Amino acid sequence: MPELPEVETTRLGISPHIIGHSIREIIIRRHDLRQPISPSLTDLIGRTFEAVTRRSKYLLLKTNANSSILIHLGMSGSLRIISPAEEWKKHDHFAITLSNGRQLRYHDPRRFGLILHLKESDIQNHPLLKNLGPEPLEETFTAARLHASLRKKNIPIKVAIMDAKTVVGVGNIYASESLFRSGIHPKLQACKLSKPRAGKLVQAIKEVLTESIQAGGTTLRDFLNTDGAPGYFKQRLFVYDRKGEPCRVCTNPISRGILGQRSTYFCPKCQKM
């Protein structure tokens, strides 16, 4: 599943091509994604894109019609900026043709993404967005805030930081990498995390996500950059998907376990309870 860095990479990739340009045509080839594509999107023809923002893993394409197009890439979705004349692929389900002669096209083999039309006044209270935690790269995500949110959580710290109510966008890969950098064992009970260690974890999350965005996201089977090239962060991973390989710090073999029904990778020597 595309994670926050992949979504942010996509946002950065498409923004220069759509901001300031109007919608010439909207094409819906299949409506049946996780939820049906909003039929009212066709009302936006002739409107102009003013901004492209991100909340957690949701892209928000703001228009001058006081509304936005919400896009979630789901398990296997991707966006490309292409020529409208380019041949449609089997799993291309949606497209927006722009006044600059380009086309934003949505590709999703598993059809678990979302494309919704939201009024600006409804965005913050939408069920998908209203209960989300802080953005990890913003100043509001601090050691004090993380520590306070974990005080009553009797669950493993890795499960806790992957909960979008605690902090958004820290998926499986980035949770494993952030816990390694901060020296925290993924099975540590969240309520037992001290404030100093919370500070180290916050810093590690920010660093891992920032580096991944700068590198273009993590190379996953289903993710491609907007130019069609895969991301390159995977070569920097310290623990994720490295079971049995030597730790890059202490040479101890990397271990693998299951937490919250997800694979968890860690170094038993470098990461402490």
Image (spheres, rainbow, N blue to C red):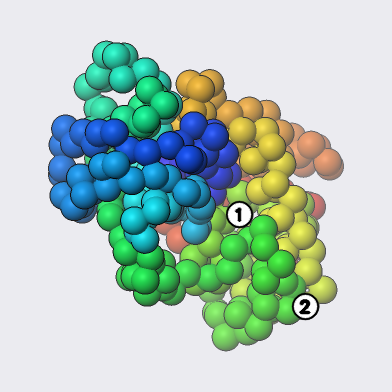
Looking at the image, residue 59 lies above or below residue 184: above
Q: Quadrant of the N terminus?
A: top left
The residue that label 1 is drawn on is: 175
Q: Residue at x 37, y 18 (%)?
A: 83
As rendered, which of 251 and 117 lies closer to the eye?
117
Residue shown at 50% from the left, 49% from the top: 51
Q: Which residue is mark 2?
A: 195
Q: Is residue 216 visible?
A: yes
Relative vertical location of residue 115 with respect to residue 87 in this rendering, above or below: below
Please name the residue shown 24% across and 36% down the image.
Answer: 26
For the residue labelled by badge 2, is the local secondary structure a helix, a strand or a loop?
Answer: helix
Categorize mark 1 by other alpha carbons within 10 Å: few (<14), some (14-19), many (20+): many
Dot 2 and dot 1 residues touching (CB under 8 Å): no
The percent coordinates of residue 20 (x first, y second) are 48, 40
Q: Is residue 262 left or right of residue 182?
A: left
Amino acid residing under circle 1: Ala
Residue 23 position (above or below residue 85):
below
Q: Identify the image quadrant of the C terminus.
A: bottom right
Please state which amino acid type lies under the numbered disc 2. Answer: Lys
Mark 1, secondary structure of its residue: helix
